[in-house]
Image (cartoon, helix red, strand yellow):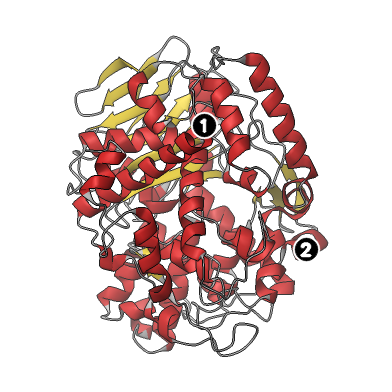
Amino acid sequence: MAYMGKILRVNLSDKSIKKEEFPKELAKKYLGGRGLASKILFDEVDPKVDALSPENKLIFATGPLTLTNAPTGGRYMVITKGPLTGGIASSNSGGFFGAKFKATGYDMIIFEGKSEKPAYLFIDDTTVEIREASHVWGKGTEDTTDILTADSGHRTANVACIGPAGENLSNFAAIINEKTRAAGRTGVGAVMGSKNLKAVVVASGKFKTPIENPEGFKAAVKGNLKTIKENGVTGEGLPALGTKVLDNIINEIGAYPTRNFIDSQFEHTDEVSGEALVEKGYLVKNVACYACPIACGRKTALPDGAKGEGPEYEVGWSYGASCGVNDLTAITRAGYMCNDLGFDAISAGATIATAMELYEKGIIKKEELGPGPELKFGSSESIIYYTKLMAKREGIGDKMADGAYRLAESYGHTEYAMTVKKQEIPAYDPRVVQGQGLAYATNNRGGDHTRAYLISPEVLGIPEKLDSQQNEGKAGWVKAFQELTAIIDAAGLCIFTSFALGAPDYLALIKNATGFDWDETEMMKTGERIWNIEREFNLRAGIDTDQDTLPDRLLNEEIKSGPGKGNVNRLDTMLPEYYQLRGWDKKGIPTEEKLKELEIV
């Protein structure tokens, strides 16, 4: 049935470990991964709980296609109530950790309570133990991974851990597995740190995912692989330049947010692009996650010998154009630091960009910076210095570690925080890509692009080309992308497959793996159910619908130059139609009829 059939429930307060039966009756309704974990969080956690209190729960979840040879079948998700938005947090990560965890015979871990002392969880085929972690507390994710791998006695052990950012409860701390892959957004690393949980270590695993219809699944995998290889994005663009293939594309259409969204084109993009990464000799080789035919990861090295992975598109933007920095060496180094310190690099760079604007406008005073460099756009020294300061929560880094919104709020100027629901918006200006703006505004986990990647149709023409600057019909596209992405996340796959694959392709994989008697309508209904239960959690947490909006700058300040000159995002023309298509009331609240239809209440 594609599930291992077991869940680990780990209470860190009393050190108890329970093995529970997987709730198969919920699998068809929520599939797994993000879906089923969101349902468990909804049922077991008070949405109004303090995200950093022991009463919050932290869930590591795989999907039915995790640990299969489905293209990219190695993803896992971390679901909790997040400290950055105050709503549901669910972060997706690749690498090999998710598959290796599922190979130990479990589908999910539910962490409860708080350990009195630093601890980590060790899992192999026969053992599940809470172990002491004081010897790695305070260390970066690279050293932690090396030390705990050695402690495990298994050279091929996989480690998911937090760095100093998570230990010091930064609202945008990430969980890093295998040193470079991140469950990055919404502050899941801070929740892990609040529980004094340093890491999860997975050693040997002998189990395989049971497939309901092996021959049908094999045929579906073969067909999907062929489609991915023949697609221009997944078969050519991403393997050649990684996600930074987008730098020049997005800049050319005038949608590349620059200097904290003051501008929408960066004059130095050629110097920091994916092409520049290759031309300057920084790229060492491509890196692939488990069962991935795309291999979009970039193993890189700097002239001084520093090595790591990336920067990818979002990291290169957040520390580059967003901060006005054209120093590729500094940008790459900042990305390495985020992995080791355990930061979400989008939020980290975007928060520094907000601080730069606050400083240049005289709101942050020079004396507040202490011995640090001036927070000016274009300062490569600043992006390194203040990343370290945020991880330590020292000086002004203490305010910055809470994220751009709370930093700006502390000075009474939230208008300079480019956030939705207090989470920093990524690298696409919604004044040009209008549908992406609607997707930002309605996202259940705040400003984010991976829950409905409207760049596919609006820029890349996948599955068809839409005019990015028009609004008509965008509400329907956003809804469909949100629900299909929920299915991809719940299944245990990477959304990059959606550049090539569509709903019928995912349906063939899921049906043959699980044996569900789904049609496409039923599958998409499951995606809708996941989206609505997340929405309901947020409403109960106090995230009211007036937060379905964008920063004032993007709604009212016209782009000054370039292809998008004169544009603002016209959210007001799209949002009512979106609510109507969702079957919600005019205020954006799911109706009782809709919740009953989806069997949520």
Q: Circles 1 and 2: CB distance less than 8 Å? A: no
In the depicted structure, whether residue 90 falls above or below residue 290:
below
Q: Is residue 182 visible?
A: yes
Task: Give the mark toward the camera: 1 or 2.
Answer: 1
Identify the mark at residue 80; answer none if there is no mark.
none
Q: Nearer the viewer, residue 465 or 191?
A: 465
Left or right of 570: which side holds 239? right
Quarter of the image holding residue 352? bottom left
Residue 273, relative to residue 131: is it above or below? below
The quarter of the image holding the C terminus is top left
> x and y percent of residue 223 in the render?
73, 31
**Residue lying farthest to the top in this orientation:** 126
The location of residue 96, given as percent across then percent down, is 58, 31
Expressed as whole percent of the image width and height from the top left, the position of residue 231 reads 76, 47
Q: Residues within 10 Å of mark 1 (few under 14, many from 20)?
A: few
Q: Which mark is residue 519?
A: 1
Q: How many marks?
A: 2
Residue on which the image places disc 2: 275
Instruction: State whether residue 197 appears in this view.
Output: no
Q: Could you give the CA–CA distance between mark 1 and mark 2, rounded to whole angstroms? A: 42 Å
Q: Residue at 38% of width from left, 52% of height from top?
A: 186
Marked residue nearer the N-terminal end (1 or 2): 2
For label 2, the SS is helix
**Residue 457's spot in the image, x, y percent?**
62, 60
